[in-house]
Amino acid sequence: MKKNFTLLLLFLVIGKGFSQEDAWIYLIDKPNVAASITNPISILSQKAIERKQNHNIAIDERDVPVNETYISDLKLQTGITVMAKSKWFNAIHVRGTEEDINALANLNYVYSIDFANQGLNEASRNASNLNKWEVENETIAFTYGDTQNQVEMINADNLHIADFTGEGITIAVMDAGFPNVNTMSAFQRLRDNSDLLNGYDFVDRTSDVYAFTGNNHGTKVLSTMAAFVQDQYVGTAPDASYYLFRTEDSGSENPVEESYWVEAAERADSLGVDMINTSLGYTDFDNSNYDYTPADMNGQVTYITKGASIAAEKGILVVVSAGNSGGTTWETVGAPADSPNVLSIGAVNADGDYVSFSSRGSAAQIGYQKPDVVARGGQAYVIDEFDSIVQNNGTSFSGPIMCGGIASLWQAIPDALPTEVMDFVRESASQFSTPDDFLGYGIPDLDLARSNALSLDNSQIETFRFYPNPVSTQLNIEMPLIANQLEVSVYNQLGQEVMNQLITEYSSFINVSDLASGIYVIKLSSANNSKAYKFIKSSN
């Protein structure tokens, strides 16, 4: 008996060093996020999808399940028991000894470890370890530093305060080169949040889009939207996602660059991007036989402009720098800024005054205004490939400053069509009622644009809902009692209207069985207002 008691006491003493702890293991990523969000029925019930639609709540990465491969691998780790999982936090609750749990930090898919016993966390995790959602919440109260003026000028800071920072918006940047974006500290936050989506070099036909090709222009352009340096620099859409495409060969000027641009725009469309930003423009070439004339800037002549117009028709919001020819004999905007279907951005200085280099509108643009609006491009703050904050002139920077601001705006009004977003931006601008060829409609107030969009009187259509979604044959539409009829228009991904009919309380459905499988936009219009949503047509 005495021997047994001694053995039991020894077991308890040894066991004390192997006591079980609980901890949350935060994971670095999720599988097939984009595909899951595009096909929400694969991750959510129909009721959940409808509820989100009814409340204008975006389906996002938090709705995507945790990577089951990671869970299976955690179950195989020494001494670890998987207790629970959370897709909202992208985390796994585990139980094990302190030593065995700390060993999980060596797994390449583990982002951070948070012990339930807070006394263990000082030694076990980096004090700056935060999951993606904590980072987003922390960065609402930005200290803008050098970018204060260029962000506040268009009132994008108020969007950021309201937690609209471009999250969920994907932007394709077409430019001349993006050296060091994959290693610079200014883009570390972008990489940590998995918002740098890589890209392609269409000039050299390589996936290495970060190599130095003799030009750092794209890196500077991207910085105005996406860079973040604590207390020193904040871009206008720090939480948007970005594809980078090199289409400009800075060593020469040849129309083939227009073709590269169109190729990249097609790639962007296939990837489902929401916006294209380009700070490129074409007027003349090394071979003068290829030169355009100012009269050609009418939205109908150049290859790149026609390509940009097609991109807009496909539902992409295209933001283009107006050009830097205001002080030359050329004067007017270049291609593709001359397209009536894109948003062309001129430049002002820190005081909001026109700067002489900014390209202007002209008589060539018949029936439409160029530039559309302006932002700071005079001595704008950018970050070069050496992580240095510098000042540069150019509509090359007013364009992306505005593009990022619009991405943050669009996050706030996700149901708006690209053409509607463009209208909201123009209508919020400082000289909307008296546009001119220097500032266009003026300096936008993007927070005012958000307020105007949200304050539209949607009383006749705000309570409708449609189901099922996805749908194979009959899409049912529930109308509010105060509406006698609604006009229903359906558009495909090319922006083409494929259906149009009136519905009433006695016939409140449309037959979509003849539509091909894919994503469509349904637009419901009452006598005074309209609203658009996306739906998925599945196979019959």
Image (spheres, rainbow, N blue to C red):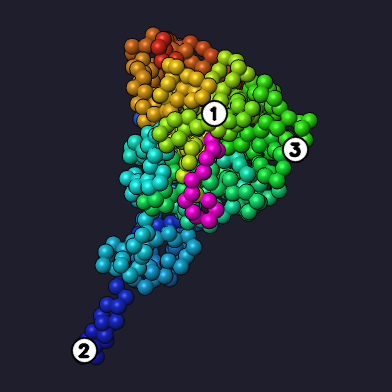
The structure residue drawn at horizontal position 70% and vertical position 32%, both measured from the top left corner, is: 284
Residue type for callout 1:
Ser
Does the magenta segment cover residue 387?
yes
Count of numbered marks: 3
Residue occupying the point 67% across, 31% down: 283
Instruction: Classify mark 2: residues with Cα within 10 Å, few (<14), some (14-19) or many (20+).
Output: few
- Find the magenta span and give its range: 384-396
Please tell me which residue lies in front, 445 or 334.
334
Q: Residue 1 carries which label?
A: 2
Residue 286's disc is 3
Label 1 vs label 3: CA separation? 25 Å
Label 3 is placed on what type of residue?
Asp
Q: Which residue is drawn at 29% across and 82% down?
A: 14
Find residue 355 and name its label.
Answer: none
Q: How far separated are the C-alphas under marks 2 and 3? A: 100 Å
* Residue 492: image location, x then y, percent: 57, 24
Query: What residue appears at the point 29 percent right and 73 percent down from the top-left corner?
Result: 19
Image quarter hosting the C terminus: top right
Determine the image quadrant of residue 289. Answer: top right
Image quadrant holding the N terminus, namely: bottom left
Q: What residue type is labelled 2?
A: Met
Point out residue 198 in the picture as x, y percentages from the top left corner.
57, 48
| Residue that extends furthest to the bottom in the rendered view of this protein | 3
Position of 22 with respect to 498 (left or right) is left
Residue placed under numbered mark 1 in the picture:
344
Q: Is residue 222 above or below residue 285?
A: below
Secondary structure, mark 1, is strand
Secondary element under disc 3, as helix, strand or loop, is loop
- Going from the N terminus, do you reach mark 2 or mark 3 first? 2
Q: In this view, does 384 lie above or below 329?
A: below
